[in-house]
Each structure stands twice: as structure tokens, then as C-alpha cells.
Amino acid sequence: MIGDRLPLALDAVTLPGAGTLAVLHPDADADLSALPRDRVRVVSPMATVCAAFAARGYDTAAALDPDVRVAASILCLTRARAEAQALVAAAMACTDVLVIIDGQKTDGADSMLKAMRQRTQMGGPISKAHGKVYWTEPSAAFADWAAGPQLQPGGFWTAPGVFSADGVDPASALLVAALPETMVGTVADLGAGWGYLSAHVLDRGADAVHLVEAHDMALQCARHNVTDPRAQFHWADATQWKPPAPVDAVVMNPPFHKSRSAEPGLGQAFIANAARVLRPHGALWMVANRHLPYEDTLTANFAKVVELDGDARFKLVRAERPKRIRR
């Protein structure tokens, strides 16, 4: 973890004496105590990560501003190679003095070091806690790694690191096929991703759709994919988001992973919040992997739960009449 390796790197290199230190894509619980807090800006596309660091007194941002210089960047590798390369390119483009790269071996720390050595001289590496940290001076040699929202052959926009970046997720497609032909009132799409469900809900006549997504890059893609004026975009934690008024329906294909670990509690929290944001006679339409244990949470939060026709991989659920559970 970065908290184990960063102090060792700072013994080997000298941080710039002044200026912002950008820390890119750390985990929400990452230990950054080796850095002077008043100079750190935590950069993460995840609203949940930014909220966690803001609560600890850190300056935060969803992305690096290409027009704002930083003295040094400390980059935490992501598992998706294209996303990690884009982060390197972004850091190189706006950093003045030093770029530090930290990552677990399972996140491609070795292969990234090899790829960077082919383009520039690298310092380190230092190995500890099943990962590596290494560093270099900013270089224009990585400009071709830059990536952002791009139009895909299927006619939709996605970006590296966004869920289902290569095509329509089959679970979401299954849910769309099960939705009623006409949808009325206001709908919330919790965990909206790049907007596939919301686009179909709008096509079926909804008065308004709230796209709630914690990943900033996914939400940027959704703005390309859903240009209807009835759409409203929210960079927020879908398990905590509150609408301006209760909604008539919720659609969702909730995530169930945090990092690489399966976390059914995340989907359960989505279900609980769906019940909170719905009108008394509202309905939840949800798709999930068949093995996920959501039934108890659904029956605890809704008076009526109906399993629709799914398939061997995914279950489809319509839940109606949310219960007002005291919390």
C-alpha cells in the first residue's frame, strides 16, 4: 500500500519545497501522512473517495486541471491499463518537478515500470508490501497515452476505467428489455454509469431522469450519451444521494465490487437508498448477478418483491411500495 512505500520513496527523492502535491486515485483509506497535508490535493474521479479525504481535511478534485500546474504528482496505479496510462499522461502534462508512481504488483506495477523505462529514465524501484514505487521527471514522451471520453463503434461514449467501457453490459440490456414500454413521472438511475439505462428510460417517456453516478469520468461520458434536457446529472454516492423530491421509479444495475473484492453490502445499500428516495407507491427495477444475496434486503425495504424473467447469470427484480424504515 502507498502508506508503506511512500515514506521510503521520500527518503530517496526530494519533494519540491513549494507548490501543490497532487495525489492521483488513492484508495479512500490511503495513508498520506508522509506528505504535508496543507499542500496535498487528492484527485479522484470517485465522489466517495473525495468525500472521505475532504472529511479528513484534504483539498480534493475530481480530475487534474490541465491548465493548473502542480509541483509534484504521486500516482496510485489503477488495475485498468488504459486508465493507468491516461493517468500517467495527465500527470506528466501538468507537473513541474517530480512524478512518483506507486502500485501493487496485482495492479500492474511491474509492467508499467517496464513500459515507462522504454520512454524515459526511471528512479527506483523500491519494493515493499507486494508493490513498488518509482519516480521520474515530467516528460512529454507520454502524450500519446492521454485518453478521455471517446465515441465507440456502437454509437456511445465511454472512457478507460469506466464500467462496461467496451460495450453494453448484458445485465443492463436484460433490464432494459424488462422495463415497461411507457415510464411516467420522475425516475432515478442509481449508479448510472455512462447512461445506458437512462437513455432508454427517457425514450419511454419519463418526465425527468436523475443520473446519479459516483465516478466523474463515467458521468462525463453520460453527458455525451444523454443529451435530453429532461436529464439531470449528479456526481454523488448513490447510496446516500437524496433527490429534491421523492421519485416515481428507480432503475439500477448496482456495482458489487470495491476494488477487487466482492462487496454485496454495496448493492444492499443501493437497495436501501432506493426505498428512501421513492414515493410511497413507487417501484424499483433492478438487475443483479444471480448469486448476490439481496432478497432479505429487498423484503426488508419493500412491501412487494417480484422476481421477473432473468436468465442463468442475472436476476431481474421489481420491488414496490417502499417501507419507511426508521434509521
Image: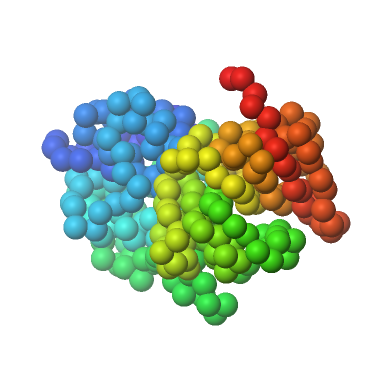
Does residue 279 lie above or below 180 as drawn? Answer: above
Residue 141 in picture, x, y percent from top left: 30, 67
Is 42 on the left-hand or right-hand side of 261? left
Q: Nearer the viewer, residue 75 or 230?
A: 230
Does residue 150 lie above or below 26 as drawn? Answer: below
Residue 299 in picture, x, y percent from top left: 77, 33
Is 309 on the left-hand or right-hand side of 228? right
Residue depicted at x 61% and y 20%:
326
Residue depicted at x 65% and y 24%:
325
Does residue 47 lie above or below 146 as drawn? Answer: above
Is 48 on the left-hand or right-hand side of 278? left
Residue 8 in picture, x, y percent from top left: 37, 32
Q: Nearer the viewer, residue 137 or 60?
A: 60
Residue 28 in sight from this viewpoint:
yes
Residue 104 in picture, x, y percent from top left: 52, 43
In the figure, residue 247 lies in which quadrant? top right
Quadrant of the drawing holding the C terminus: top right
Residue 166 in sight from this viewpoint:
no
Total marks shown come to 0
Does residue 151 lie above or below 123 as drawn? Answer: below
Q: Residue furthest left?
A: 18
Residue depicted at x 73% and y 43%:
319
Residue depicted at x 28% and y 57%:
92
Q: How is the image coloured?
A: rainbow
Q: Residue furthest bottom?
A: 153
Q: Nearer the viewer, residue 194 or 187?
A: 187
Q: Nearer the viewer, residue 89 or 270?
A: 270
In the figure, residue 24 lies in which quadrant? top left
